[in-house]
Image: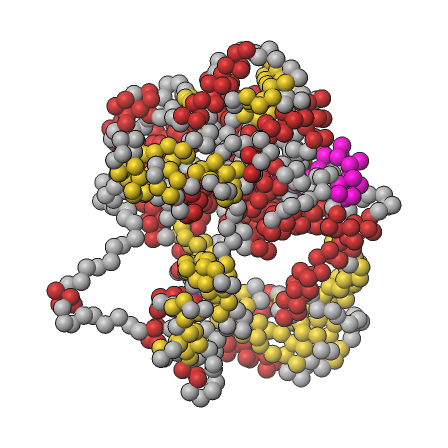
Amino acid sequence: MRLCIAEKPSVAKEIARILGANQRKDGYFEGNGYWVSWTFGHLCTLKEPDDYDPSLKRWDLLTLPIIPVRFAIKVMDDSGVKKQFNTLKTLINKATEVINCGDAGQEGELIQRWVLHEAGCNKPVKRLWISSLTEEAIRDGFQNLKDGSEFDLLYAAGSSRAIGDWLLGINATRLYTLKYGGYKQVLSIGRVQTPTLALMVDRHKTIENFTPETYWELKTKYRDVVFTARGEQLDEYGGEEGKLKDKEKADALVASLQGKPFEIVSFTKKKGKETPPKLFDLTSLQVSCNKRFGFSADQTLKLAQSLYEKKVLTYPRVDTTHLPNDIYPEIPKILGALTKFQEEVAPLRGQKIRKSKKVFDDKKVTDHHAIIPTKVPARGLNHNEQAVYDLVARYFIAAFYPDCIVSKTEVEGKVEEILFKVSGKQILEDGWRVLFKKEAEAAQKKKKEEDEEQVLPDFKKGEQGPHDPFLKEKVTTPPKPYTEATLLRAMETAGKQVDDEELRDLMKENGIGRPSTRAAIIETLLRRKYIEKQRKNLHPTPMGVQLIDTIKNDLLKSAELTGIWEKKLREIEDGDYKVQDFMAEMKEMVTEVVQSVKYDRTARTIVPAAAPDKPTASTSKGTKEKKPTTSQQLSCPKCKTGKIVKGSTAFGCTGWKDGSCDFKVDFTWNGKKLTDKQVQTIIQKGRSPLIKGIEVNGKKTEGYLALTKAFQLEFQEVEKAPLRCPVCQQHEVVKGRAAYGCMGIKYKTCSFKVPFEVMGKKLSESAVEALIRKGKTPLLKGLVDQQGQKVEGYLTLGANGQVSFEVKGKR
């Protein structure tokens, strides 16, 4: 029998169907000469320090650095995981051949290899390597199975990454926690997360310490066209890169130009081409979805993964924007499957499909190609999935549209020795831009407002005429706080600001982390409260700033150095760097960090957010300190001049007295009374914190109250993701007559369910949701044990979906 091991139950089920292994067994499918089983995430992990030496369970500076002589792995301590591993081990020992059907990437290879290693596999191993989960791709993959040894270097790189992360994470976290942590506080340090936090802290300090400076630009209007002065001639008037910083000298310069003729010294007009935007890799998709839809990087990755599992998108965890040449003949079939975009695809029908090196390049394709639609029509997608799919489809169609043809004009003029320049652009043929009309119009409007790329009339060299010189006052601005989109780009280029796409591609190999892990890094920093999200912006917390200030060793926080480590891991994957050399360098680095911090004599302690001061005797009785009122704190967000005051039924702007402003926020909205804090947040940030128990359309829900552009309140409901079955990972969990169950029960492909009543207690919907989403309920009281005694504790969910009881305070 041949054993196929897939990355998760849903993929195993699909492979089993295609191979004809239709008999469902406990932990695998059987039939037609195949066993098809699965993992679910990591079944095995690197051993903990106390697995090597029990004394290392206790955190102590004297035991650092912890560097095992030989790293080993173990099966994770979970009953469901152990059961599935034992099933796999039995099948591996009985099989004649093993086919690794894991996720086709570095992490997927590592997950499978660790299982095979721990199970003592000595059978021949083949590798299924595919870029989509369509039936055609799976059948083709099985016709062209690769030898498992072809991926030894991929495994070596993944193993080196995991061991490097273990070495640094275990040692640096213990080190900094013991040396600088507050009471019961763990300071988490990571090879990727700490340099990412350092990027944010550096940006935060730049903004905080920024001092705005006023400057002036010299401009002149000639034939209704605004020209801007450029050149070294401005230096003697206090100019620097076109910025005049001395107002008196600038005024004198304008006066000196008055009445003197403006002469055109050069006029060039050229046709140019703008090629279609590149196809998506994971990072560019995350960036685009964050800008367009406000999706977090993690949310975009999960949506793309869901679309991949629904067979409508190709593999998402990729770092290339190119396609291999052998996919070119399939393009018409893929375009034909885009049923929603038949109008956009129509101009391409019957035409030879464009083949550009910017799209098709075998040298730029590594394990997988760019993210594109498959030949399977997209049906039954939820709102967010549809948004991501449509975006990928539109970019895919654009790749085969004609270039956008533009006319680029550059004009230079002068008044005496002062040079002036202006440039303009006019779209002559839309080409691919017809697919992005709304975006193009918005961009054009913004450029016009900024006097950029005007549509220029024709000029003649040597022509002269009167002009109107003037100064335009401007103020320097600090860099903007990171959003998830800009942080992802910064991680991709190791913190360097790179706008050029070609240059950014060259820098990818030196980026921080991998495309598939960057979203998780951001989520980790949020979860550990090192950073926080304020609307779309990300900011470091005081604790995050303290941590980076405390770390003096650049090896831990330098984005560039971390990018070099990433490059070396890629070189291991390519066979250009030895694992032994990488590990030796990691061990040397960890030892150096430990020694430098161990002997640090400065007395520093990093603490979480400061606790509120306790009331003193003088303020606790009779003479309570008066808090500032809302009216003292807040300006009107609408008119920007009035103050907010609290009236009898609403908070409103003082402008109501003279009729200059009508802004107000009522105390109640749809019968829900708003707290002063909620109103204050709405006025300051444009949106309330999460409000629960608010009635909308006759039912109670939760969401946010936000100010519209017209400064009216509107309700934004929280869109909850459907409950995904934790066992099969394919179907939703729905409420039945006596239990919550997987939709797969209906199709006899899954048996997961949670009864309405467990241990004599009826479970609330929120408790069931927490159990399924988080694997554990909140504390439940009033449960009845087997002896009839009332107990309190938690319900937990095992890897195979079994519900267990955990007594409060102990397992």
Which corner quadrant of the image does residue 596 belong to?
Answer: top left
Taking depth in this image into account, of 187 and 305 the one nearest to the observer is: 305
The reply to whether the magenta stretch includes residue 73 is no
Position of residue 779 measured from the top left corner of the image (x, y, whole percent):
32, 43
Q: Where's the C terminus, which quadrant? A: top left
Position of residue 2 measured from the top left corner of the image (x, y, whole percent):
61, 15
Q: Is residue 357 visible?
A: no
Q: What residue is drawn where x is 14% and y is 72%? A: 622
Taking depth in this image into account, of 270 and 467 the one nearest to the observer is: 270
The relative height of residue 16 versus residue 486 in the rendered view (above or below) is above
Q: Is residue 136 visible?
A: yes
Position of residue 451 measured from the top left corner of the image (x, y, whole percent):
65, 70
Left or right of 506 in this view: 770: left
The reply to whether the magenta stretch includes residue 320 is yes
Left or right of 221 in this view: 59: left
Q: What residue is drawn where x is 63% and y is 39%? A: 310
Q: Where's the N terminus, which quadrant? A: top right
Q: In this figure, which colouring scheme has been used for the structure?
A: secondary structure
Q: What residue is drawn where x is 35% and y is 26%? A: 48
Q: Which residues are magenta?
A: 316-337
Q: What residue is drawn where x is 38% and y is 68%? A: 673
Q: How many marks?
A: 0
Which corner quadrant of the image does residue 592 belong to?
Answer: top left
